[in-house]
Image (cartoon, helix red, strand yellow):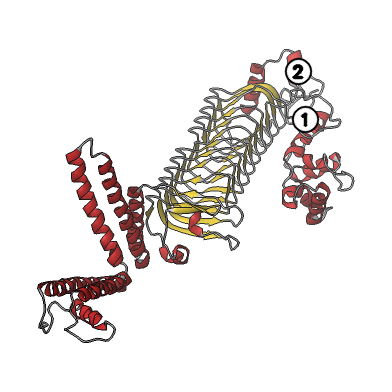
Amino acid sequence: MSRTCSYFSSNAWERRLDQYIHQFWEIEHFFRESDVHEVSDSINEIANDLNDIDADTVARLPVGQVIERVDTEKYNLEREFIREIWREQADLPQECPYEVHETSDQFCVCHMSPSERRAVGLTSDDVLAWIQSKLDSSVVEKEAYSFVGARFRRLDFSAEIITTDDNYPIDFRYAQITDEFDCQDAVFDQVIRFKGAQFACQADSDAESGDLKYGDHFVDFDANIDFTRSEFRKKVDFKFVLFGSDASFNNAAFGPGMFNYGLFRGRADFMAATFEGKADFSKAQFEQAAILNADYKSAAIYNYTTFSNDVAIWTTTFQEKAEFWATSFQGNLNARYAEFHGQVRFEEVTFEGEVTFDHANFEENVHFRDVSSESIISLRDTVLTSGLIRLPANRPPFYDLRRAVVGDIDLRCDDGLTDDLFEYFYVQKTEFSDFDFTEYSANLRPHWNLHTNDIDGTPIELDADPATLEATYLKAKKGANEVGHNKAASEFFFHEMRFRKQQHAQRAHESLSEIFAEPYQSIREGIFSGTRWVSNATLGFIAGYGERPRNVIYSSLFVILVFAVGYKFLDAANVYAGVIGEEYILLSFQSFITFILGQTPDQATFWFEFFTALQGFIGAFLIALLVFTLTRSIHR
């Protein structure tokens, strides 16, 4: 008489559950399910007991970490009770659907321990053949393809097509694979579940439960998990999976891929993988480098994910939304040339290494909200079409926007931020397209300076090259004109001309320094650049490059006073009689506002008439310039 496998009533299964529950079940979730605790009060009380951790962090701690540090009786955290509560809310099989193997006392082939199978001569090929026989079974039941809690040393699906005659999922939840799992070039033709599985985990699964310590199952095996070029044609569930060593999903093809709460102890490689459905890595942990350069055709979710090492998403394509909410990047993030075609959120994210989005393209809304970063967030040559960048009051990061295209981006800061908003943005040769300068007039006044930043109270310039700065303000002027902000366009044009003047001075100085090497060319270039410098400087002084009507007025008053002094030395007092010399000022003023005097003085000399004519010419020029600058300023 055949017997059914009794694995789900064994100590080995109890121990396996403890390993999983203590690692992945959050204490807050346990309190809610147990219904014997007031959740907030219990969490706050634990936080008070621990002293070194806040309540929000306690709520996200695994049960295993908590029971090692608190009085378990005080909070009703006995292992048996935790396991009982978890069973009530978990969808677990009540019994194994397979018969006990002829060489075993109580277990089927997949639930025998690797050492037990080895002792009776069952090889990995035998195990695979047994699994395939169950998948080929004509019995159509919910538990027909259940390998929950299976224990393997080696499992080789390479180049296999894993399929069945119906659509029931193949279930490897909470399975343990200690040495090798090879799925290279495999095809999974239907839903396959690996939730809670452990790859390269503790080898001895026969041990009694005893006193389990948190982290017992973290044993370092040199066992790589290879899903290279695997094809998962329907949903694949890797939630709560422990990958104890390197895991390769290189060129793998997924429908929806669920990796929530996964723990990657080794290098995770998703290079050139494709996700046709949602890719969810929420609350996963990556302890080594994570290469996530996949093609995400649906949503990519990395909320509350922890990356302890470097992360690469360069040249990655996100077709729909990409979420990084409360994500922790403890290494470097390389997102060069990434393509974000949907909404992107980096909110409450922590960056501890270098952050590079150079040449990335954000086609829709991108949100950098309350981001914390130890380094400059590099957005050089990046296209930011629309979205929000909000600076936190506490240690706001710097954003490098050099040569970027900034569209309809909303720049904000918390009320507690004491520095000026634009001090945290590096702007050089930045193109503004649909950027609303109107919103930031108060932040830019009175100097309308985009190219300097203030770090610890010390102003710095990223690049003192006048040509670069001229191009910076030229692009800013174009952006301001596009949105009709005439005041900003006027101020940016003023800066543009100012840095053009510096270029002429720089070229003139360089020509003088090379006069002995190439005399003719140096003198010619020096005269040419010097002339342009004088012209630019004169226009800037007397009219503020056409943007400062007050400069014209001040220049006119200066001319009137200078010529009044000149008339004094020409002894033109016979024209008018005055007490304290005001007759010279009156004469200068009248000469300034007309080309020809109404009456020539009796004793007028040649030089007197020359000076009045010259002043009349200058006055006409300045009056015309005043009309031009007034018209220009009123128009703006």
Label annotation for residue 473: none
Tell me residue 49's x, y (percent): 83, 49
**Residue at the right extreme of this rendering:** 73
Residue 19 found in image quarter: top right
- Disc 1 element: loop
Q: Position of residue 333 (x, y in %)?
A: 53, 39
**Contact? badges 2 and 1 (CB < 8 Å):** no
The residue drawn where x is 32% and y is 55% is 474
| Side of 478 where 572 appears, left or right | left
- The spot of residue 427 in percent (x, y) is 42, 52
Q: Quadrant of residue 359?
A: top left
Q: Nearer the viewer, residue 184 or 332?
A: 332
Amino acid type of the residue that numbered disc 1 sits on in the rendered structure:
Asp
Cα separation between marks 2 and 1: 19 Å
Crowd band around label 1 with a 10 angstrom C-alpha radius: few (<14), some (14–19), many (20+): few
Residue under numbered circle 2: 115
Mark yes or no: residue 8 visible.
Answer: no
Is 3 located above or below residue 555 in the figure?
Answer: above
Q: Element type at marker 2?
A: helix
Q: Amino acid at mark 2?
A: Ser
Give the camera-side residue of 282 and 185: 282
Residue designated by label 1: 216
The residue lying at 26 percent from left, 58 percent from top is: 536
Q: Is residue 63 above or below residue 113?
A: below
Task: Locate the N terminus by quadrant.
Answer: top right
> Horizontal and vertical percent for residue 275?
51, 39
Q: Quadrant of residue 132?
A: top right
